[in-house]
Amino acid sequence: MIEKRTAIDQIEITDNGTVMVRFGLMLVEDGNVVHRQWHRTAIPPGISVNDQLAVVDENLTQMNAAAIDREKIPLLKSIVELVHTPAVVSAYEALTTKETT
C-alpha cells in the first residue's frame, strides 16, 4: 500500500531572521520512499507559525498531498521563537516598511 506523507525536512534561518522551511512530500510503500518532491515556505519575523502552517496545509490539500506531519512542529516553533526576538521583528518591520515606501 502506498501512503502519502509530508514531513518537515529542513529548517534554515536567513540573515534577516526569516525561517525557511522545506517539506518533503513523499510517497511511501512498505516503509520505503518511492517518490519525493519538495515544497517550501517562509516564516518572516512577526508571522505566526500556526497561521503560516495553516496556509501550507491548505495548499497541500489543493495539491492532493498529505497534511504536514505534526512530529517536528514543536521543534519548528521553538526555533522560530528563539530567532524571532522583539529586536529581530522590529528590524524586519523597519526593513520591509523602508522597502515599500
Image: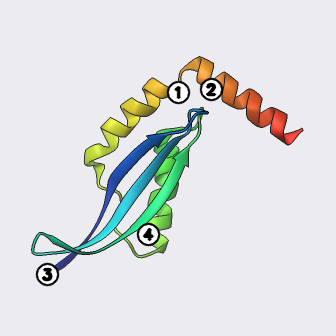
The residues bearing labels 3 and 2 have C-alpha atoms spaced at a distance of 45 Å
- Which is more N-terminal, label 2 or label 3? 3
At a point 49% along the width and 73% down the height, the residue shown is 62
- Determine which residue is flagged by label 3: 1
- Determine which residue is flagged by label 1: 84
**Is label 2 in contact with label 1 (beta carbons under 8 Å)?**
yes
At a point 59% along the width and 19% down the height, the residue shown is 86
- Determine which residue is flagged by label 4: 61
Q: Position of residue 66 (x, y in %)?
A: 34, 67
- Foreground mark, 3 or 1? 1
- Which is more N-terminal, label 1 or label 3? 3
Q: What element does badge 4 sit on?
A: helix
Name which quarter of the figure residue 47 lies in. top right
Q: Nearer the viewer, residue 13 or 3?
A: 13
At a point 68% along the width and 24% down the height, the residue shown is 91
The residues bearing labels 2 and 1 have C-alpha atoms spaced at a distance of 6 Å
**Image height of 61 relative to 42, above or below:** below
- Determine which residue is flagged by label 2: 89
- Which is more N-terminal, label 4 or label 1? 4
